[in-house]
Image (tube, rainbow, N blue to C red):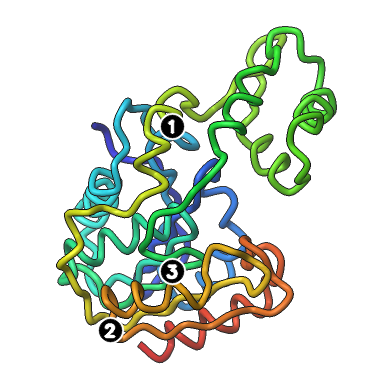
Amino acid sequence: MKHLNYTELGQGRPIIILHGLFGSARNWQGIARSLADSHHVITPDLRNHGQSPHTQSMSYMEMADDVIAIADKLKLNDVIILGHSMGGKVAMTAALSNPERFSALAVIDIAPVSYEHDFDELITAMHALKLDSLKNRTQAEEALGKVIDDIGVIQLLLQNLVRSGDGFKWRINLDGIMANLTLIGQFPDSLNNNACRLPSLFLGGAESDYLRNIHNTAIYNYFPAAEITMINGAGHWPHAEKPNEFLKHIKTFINFV
């Protein structure tokens, strides 16, 4: 597969930031700019997202290898890897399978466990949009709003809707993602006996169900040096909902390690 699309900002110690499902590097540019004051920040589009290649397979091991390929291409050492949600699982997989490539790990609102999800309903709703006759994004938002009751999720999905001729198209590979939803909900069994002693921050939203006390045992089994911190008043997107608190935690962590 060709290299992932990515952006670079700043100079200094490298940080790779990995977005979540249905996201892209664009979602993280504000955070990246804040960190680029002192670091070399790389924000890729994961496969089947943003402007990166579309593929039929997207296991966590494959996505971790994609990230390693960027580190190889840019000759990066002493890398801090940060990932949110699905990107957090990619970051954990990369750290567990290639610990020598990284110096620290930050995982945002996700744990190394399997989750139940309803992402197939989101993809079905996206597929149902009549893109050829769509006049504007407001029509798309109204249509999705009839089946999705979370405006934040709708806005995240609509960031993937782009103009195409007189209509619109989805920039992400809906079919490729749909085919891999079961894998995306899981965490690789092949890593069950791995442990990574890198300095690790697990930073969650206190209002989210994705990172709870019941996940602590799994986190410490994989990452014995983990620190688990919650941001009050934030849900699954603490970097967007509480950006100042989020940055304070991340900067403290990366300056310490």
Name the image quarter holding the C terminus. Answer: bottom left
Q: Residues within 10 Å of mark 1 (few under 14, many from 20)?
A: many
Q: For the view shown, which residue lies furthest in the bottom direction?
A: 256
Q: Position of residue 183 (x, y in %)?
A: 34, 42
In this view, 71 is above or below 12: above
Which kind of residue does numbered mark 2 sit on? Pro
Tell me which label, 1 or 3, sits earlier in the chain: 3
Q: Position of residue 96 (x, y in %)?
A: 22, 66
Give 131 or 181, whichever is nearer the viewer.
Answer: 181
**Disc ID at residue 107:** 3
Tell me which label, 2 or 1, sits earlier in the chain: 1
Which residue is found at the position 24% from the left and 64% from the top? 76
Q: Residue 121: name its quadrant.
A: top right
Element type at mark 2 = loop
Residue bearing mark 2: 224
Q: Position of residue 42 (x, y in %)?
A: 41, 58
Which residue is found at the position 78% from the left and 45% from the top? 151
Q: Nearer the viewer, mark 3 or mark 2?
A: 2
Name the image quarter holding the N terminus. Answer: top left
Which kind of residue does numbered mark 1 sit on? Ile
Element type at mark 1 = helix
Q: Is residue 90 left or right of residue 76?
A: right
Q: Residue 154: name its quadrant.
A: top right
Q: Residues within 10 Å of mark 3 (few under 14, many from 20)?
A: many
Cα separation, mark 1 vs mark 3, equals 22 Å
Cα separation, mark 3 vs mark 2, equals 14 Å
Q: Is residue 194 left or right of residue 134?
A: left
Q: Residues within 10 Å of mark 2 (few under 14, many from 20)?
A: some
**Disc ID at residue 177:** 1
Which kind of residue does numbered mark 3 sit on? Val
Which residue is found at the position 25% from the left and 60% from the top? 94
In this view, 219 is above or below 149: below
